[in-house]
Image: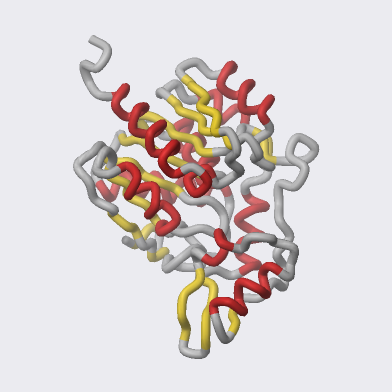
Amino acid sequence: MTVDGVPIRVTDFGGDGPPVLALHGSFGRAAVFAGLTRELDGRARLLAPDQRGHGHSGRTATYTADDFVADAAALIERLGLGPMVVLGHSHGGITAYRLAARRPDLVSALIIEDVGPVMRAPEIAHPVLDVRGWPAAAPTKEQLAEAIRARGVPDPGYFMQSAEPADDGWRLLFDWDDMMAVQTGGVGDWWPDWLESSCPALVLHGEHSPLLPADLATRMVARRPGSRLVEFPGAGHWIHDDDPAGTARAIADFLDELRPGRNS
């Protein structure tokens, strides 16, 4: 699809369940949800865009938080599926709950994966990963992964989900400077946005997350009616990778609860 002149690739993973707009985090792409879709096994139909500057979608001049909200709103309108459940991981989670605050007509429920209503220091020790000058290509996939590992990333697997073969080796599908702008645009105090919406919300929290402290996860759910917290022992920030079966189970149960007449 083309949104405000920007080509946006959307992956429809299919399935007979309720449609869910799935928004990846910084450095990601729609494909990061492929494993989760398999685990859901038809209990949800994930539609996931490569958001601006990511994957096979177009690069743009700006990557503000409002840009991503506007893109998500336009996608739901173009898909004609609103109001729909919106799932967001990390930066995508901020976009999801800010969309619900601004366009409640488009969002029926929220699934927020491991991000809170604050993304700034001192609440979050390292809200932005400085990736300026990091390697974008290498002769082989292994060499590209090793070059990222040399930057202090023990497991570059998440970044490598956005790596693909190129004419001269392997390359990443994003620009590191763009990713700095994406991350910076997500920094802020987003409490008013989180508290503004009233639709049902599921918050997923990884025990070892560096971006959502346990006390903040507890407070964000306690302060917003209609919210529920599910903890994932042993998981980090990428819960859908660390515990795919558990993530799918929590999401499927939440979607079942939303079905009309379920509680009647």
Residue at (56, 21) in percent of width and height:
221
- Residue 115 appears in view: no
Query: Which residue extends farthest bottom?
Result: 168
Q: Is residue 39 left or right of residue 223?
A: left
Residue at (75, 47) in percent of width and height:
126
**Residue 25 place in picture, x, y as percent:** 53, 51
Instruction: Relative to 171, say whether 19 is above or below.
Output: above
Q: Is residue 10 left or right of residue 226?
A: left
The quarter of the displayed image where residue 115 is located: top right
**Residue 213 place in picture, x, y as percent:** 68, 33
Query: Which residue extends farthest right?
Result: 122
Q: Is residue 61 left or right of residue 74?
A: right
Q: How many marks?
A: 0
Residue at (60, 27) in percent of width and height:
192
Q: What's the colour scheme?
A: secondary structure
Q: Quadrant of the C terminus?
A: top left
**Residue 88 place in picture, x, y as percent:** 47, 42
Looking at the picture, tell me which residue is in the foreground, 231 or 192: 231
Query: Which residue extends farthest top?
Result: 264
Instruction: Relative to 121, say whether 174 is above or below.
Output: below
Q: Is residue 207 left or right of residue 60?
A: right
Q: Quadrant of the N terminus?
A: bottom left
**Residue 90 place in picture, x, y as percent:** 56, 44
Looking at the picture, tell me which residue is in the foreground, 68 or 237: 237
- Residue 126 appears in view: yes
Residue at (64, 59) in percent of width and height:
181
